[in-house]
Image (spheres, grey):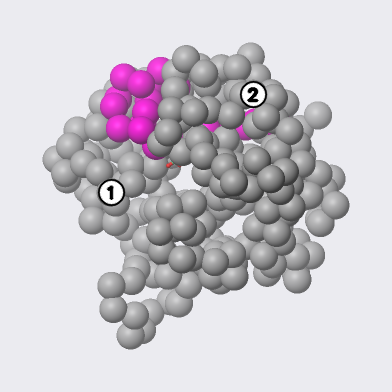
Amino acid sequence: MFERTPMIAGNWKMNLSLDEAVALVEAIGSGIGNVSDVEVLVAPPFTHLAAVRGAIDASKIFLAAQNMHWEMSGAYTGEISGRMLQHSGCTHVILGHSERRTLFNETSEVVNLKVRAASFLGLIPVVCVGETLDERESERTFEVIKEQLDLSLDNFRADQMMPTSTILAYEPVWAIGTGKTATPEQAEEVHHFIRLWIEQTFNSGTAAQVRILYGGSVKPDNVKTLMAEPDIDGALVGGASLKSDSFVQLIRSQKA
Ligand code: PEP
């Protein structure tokens, strides 16, 4: 069986001053020491990317942005391109986070444009999908996830090829920032569905290699049981990534 390296990713959202961001990443760097069996990713706000990059050992902590525009340059006031992210030291970019989808009307078609641009540049996309409480309660979870995957990764479907470095994140909207975590069984059911979708859409080799992170109120006391599930390869963490103690504890909670 293919061994997928676990990943713990911190999404700092629109939080922290520049000094706080640098201090946090320095504390994470010293807290994790030489941990090598898990990949660590942090996603600061755009304005903090370069300073955070300067404060970390790039071989230990990867840097992500939380969003990007799909064009390379041009008259797009207020937007940031993937190339600019690379110039700031990013290797990854989070795309289609539910806050972008719900608060900023980002559709899966737009997410697909961004995924295509990121892949063209060699930036690794962390593509988020997830259902709302309403959709779960009306038993539409799998239908919603399938549609988000079909449309957000449409370009890969057209190419009949998805890079195995692509990272997917299942984040039930009802579990983000609410303190409600999906049970390991609820999360695994959807992760397994996503892995089958990859297998059916592409092939079994890709399905075996692509990492699928879980996100939604992940904390040091629930990460181990979630990651013990066979199709959960790590966590995308909001709140608990803003304190070095809790984030380092998450990183140190290894897959059994
Ligand atoms: C997130 O924003 O992706 C997230 C999962 O947040 P939290 O961990 O705070 O629920």
Q: Quadrant of residue 55?
A: top left
Percent x, y of residue 92: 47, 51
Q: In which of the image's four quarters is ligand 1 placed? A: top left
Percent x, y of residue 200: 85, 52
Q: Is residue 247 a member of the stretch shown in magenta?
A: yes
Q: Is residue 186 visible?
A: yes
Q: Is the C-beta of the residue carrying label 1 under 8 Å from the nearest atom of ligand 1?
A: no
In the displayed structure image, the side of residue 26 where residue 193 appears, left or right: right
Q: Quadrant of the N terminus?
A: top right
Residue under label 1: 14
**Amino acid marked by disc 2:** Pro
Name above or below for residue 162 compared with residue 20. Answer: below
In the displayed structure image, the side of residue 99 where residue 165 appears, left or right: right
Residue at left offset 79%, top offset 65%: 160
**Amino acid marked by disc 1:** Met
Name above or below for residue 220 compared with residue 91. Answer: above
Q: Nearer the viewer, residue 155 or 239?
A: 239
Q: Which of the numbered marks, if any, corresponds to residue 90? A: none
Q: Is residue 59 visible?
A: no
Q: Is residue 136 a member of the stretch shown in magenta?
A: no
Residue at left offset 37%, top offset 28%: 240
Stretch in magenta: 231-250
Residue under label 2: 184
Mark 2: secondary structure: helix
Mark 1: secondary structure: loop
Crowd around label 1: few <14 · some 14–19 · many ≥20 (10 Å): few
